[in-house]
Amino acid sequence: MAISIRLSPKDEARLQALATKTGRSKTFYVREAIHEHLDDLEERYWADGVIRTWEASGRETRPAAELWVELGL
């Protein structure tokens, strides 16, 4: 799938400098950046879903220090 994006002149210059310095293509680094950011976004939305599920369950929370004392840690 082809995607067209507009980069700021500063980001374009940074991307070009990195590609030139490493001998890799700008496309390589754009793909890498998207891949890494998608991983982060997926984890963030997964965690948000877990928190929302917990909050909707009505279960109570307690401080970690209290739990550690109870567990003898």
Image (spheres, helix red, strand yellow):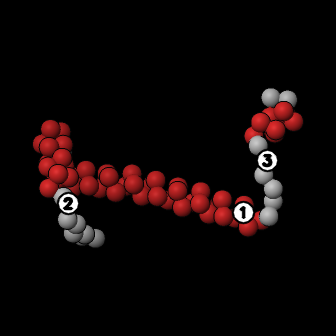
**Marks 3 and 1, how far apart at CA:** 13 Å
For badge 3, the amino acid type reads Arg
Callout 2 secondary element = loop
Give the vertical position of 2 relative to 43 (above or below).
below
For badge 2, the amino acid type reads Leu
Count neighbours of disc 1 (C-alpha within 10 A) and say few if under 14, some if 14 to 19, many if 20 or more: few
Residue drawn at (21%, 69%) of the image: 4
Q: Earlier in the sequence, mark 3 or mark 1?
A: 1
- The residue wearing badge 1 is 55
Nearer to me, 63 or 12: 63
For badge 1, the amino acid type reads Glu
- The residue wearing badge 3 is 62
49 left or right of 22?
right
User: Horizontal and vertical percent for residue 45?
Assistant: 54, 61
- The residue wearing badge 2 is 7
User: Horizontal and vertical percent for residue 56?
Assistant: 73, 67
Nearer to me, 66 or 31: 66
Count neighbours of disc 3 (C-alpha within 10 A) and say few if under 14, some if 14 to 19, many if 20 or more: few
